[in-house]
């Protein structure tokens, strides 16, 4: 969420901290590792922080996990945040949607947010993800080189029901992967454990697959063993390596 955090910093610069509120919806789909850093950055900027509970898992369309899952997630988030904004006298709820998102193809979450009146200052200004990162670096924001962090539900293959059990299992598996690689002294930037049912597909930086995590290496075996211990019957390394939104590949093939 580097774009959302940059947007928060920009809003504080433009409007002042007393006219901005930072909001993060807490639910089973938000990794716990993302919660404290988001709060700490907002508090460092001097703005009020609200962390309302969202209940997207109570929405049938979200649990069904079809290609439009993100619509129901964003609808829930905006339905929760809009009244909170009104209570505080705020005119708008803004999202971190950027110019790259606007041309990235099917984005049901963007549709849901637009239908509920959310504004998108970064997209309106034509700022891409790379431009946001560069501006964040110049401003000294700690998130300037932070890897993208999608919700836990994005790890569950489309068509498989999203449940608290699956989300917790994925979160445990990713934590176990990072611990396993740290113990082996292997540096890691991007990681996803994809839930394909009872099988897990692990995506890591592609360069590692050619060297330290090549098939048959002790480190690769230890990594997959760690994933299986988290509750998966089987696990394997994705030969293509990490790529953001890889679950969408199946949708494009339909």
Image: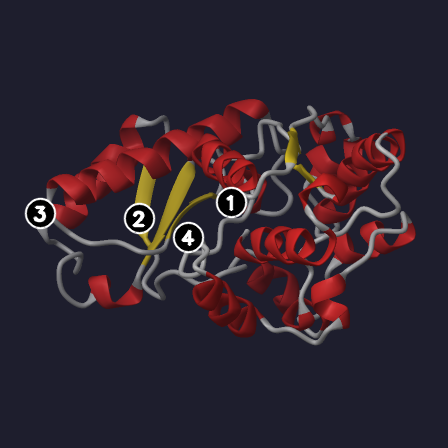
Q: Closer to the N terminus: mark 1 or mark 3?
A: 1
How far apart are the alpha carbons under marks 3 and 2?
14 Å
Residue 21 pos. (x, y %): 71, 39
How far apart are the alpha carbons under marks 1 and 3?
25 Å
Residue 75 pos. (x, y %): 81, 41
Q: Nearer the viewer, mark 1 or mark 4?
A: 4
How far apart are the alpha carbons under marks 1 and 2?
15 Å
The residue that mark 4 highlights is 142
Residue 254 pos. (x, y %): 67, 65
Residue 179 pos. (x, y %): 22, 36
Q: Closer to the N terminus: mark 1 or mark 2?
A: 1
Measured along the vertical axis of the image, is residue 63 above or below residue 241? above
Q: Is residue 137 left or right of residue 29?
A: left
Q: Secondary structure at mark 3?
A: helix
Classed neighbour count for the residue bearing mark 1: other residues with Cα under 10 Å, few (<14), some (14–19), many (≥20): many
Q: Nearer the viewer, residue 131 or 171?
A: 131
How far apart are the alpha carbons under marks 4 and 2?
33 Å
The residue that mark 2 highlights is 236
The residue that mark 1 highlights is 155
Q: Closer to the N terminus: mark 1 or mark 4?
A: 4
Measured along the vertical axis of the image, is residue 174 above or below residue 205? above
User: Who's the residue at 13% across and 47% down the image?
Assistant: 219
The residue that mark 3 highlights is 218
How far apart are the alpha carbons under marks 1 and 4?
25 Å
User: Who's the residue at 59% across and 38% down the image?
Assistant: 46
């Amino acid at each position: 969420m580097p774009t959302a955090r940059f947007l928060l910093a920009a809003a504080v610069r433009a409007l002042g901290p007393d006219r901005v509120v930072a909001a993060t919806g807490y639910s089973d789909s938000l990794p716990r590792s993302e919660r404290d850093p988001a709060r700490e950055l907002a508090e460092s900027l001097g703005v009020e922080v609200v962390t309302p509970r969202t209940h997207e898992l109570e929405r049938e369309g979200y649990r069904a996990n079809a290609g439009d899952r993100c619509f129901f997630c964003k609808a829930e988030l905006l339905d929760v945040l809009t009244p909170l904004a009104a209570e505080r006298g705020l005119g708008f709820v803004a999202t971190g949607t950027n110019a790259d998102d606007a041309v990235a193809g099917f984005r049901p979450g963007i549709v849901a947010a637009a239908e509920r009146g959310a504004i998108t200052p970064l997209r309106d200004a034509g700022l891409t993800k790379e431009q946001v990162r560069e501006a964040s670096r110049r401003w000294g924001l700690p998130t300037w080189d932070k890897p993208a962090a999608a919700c836990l539900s994005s790890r569950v293959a489309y068509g498989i029901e999203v449940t608290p059990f699956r989300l917790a299992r994925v979160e445990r598996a990713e934590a176990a992967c990072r611990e396993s690689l740290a113990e082996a002294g292997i540096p890691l930037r991007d990681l996803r454990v994809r839930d394909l049912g009872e099988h897990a597909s692990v995506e890591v930086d592609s360069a590692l697959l050619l060297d330290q995590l090549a098939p048959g290496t002790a480190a690769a075996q230890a990594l997959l063993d760690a994933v299986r211990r988290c509750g998966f019957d089987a696990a394997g390394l994705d030969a293509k390596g990490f790529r953001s939104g890889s679950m969408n590949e199946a949708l494009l093939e339909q």
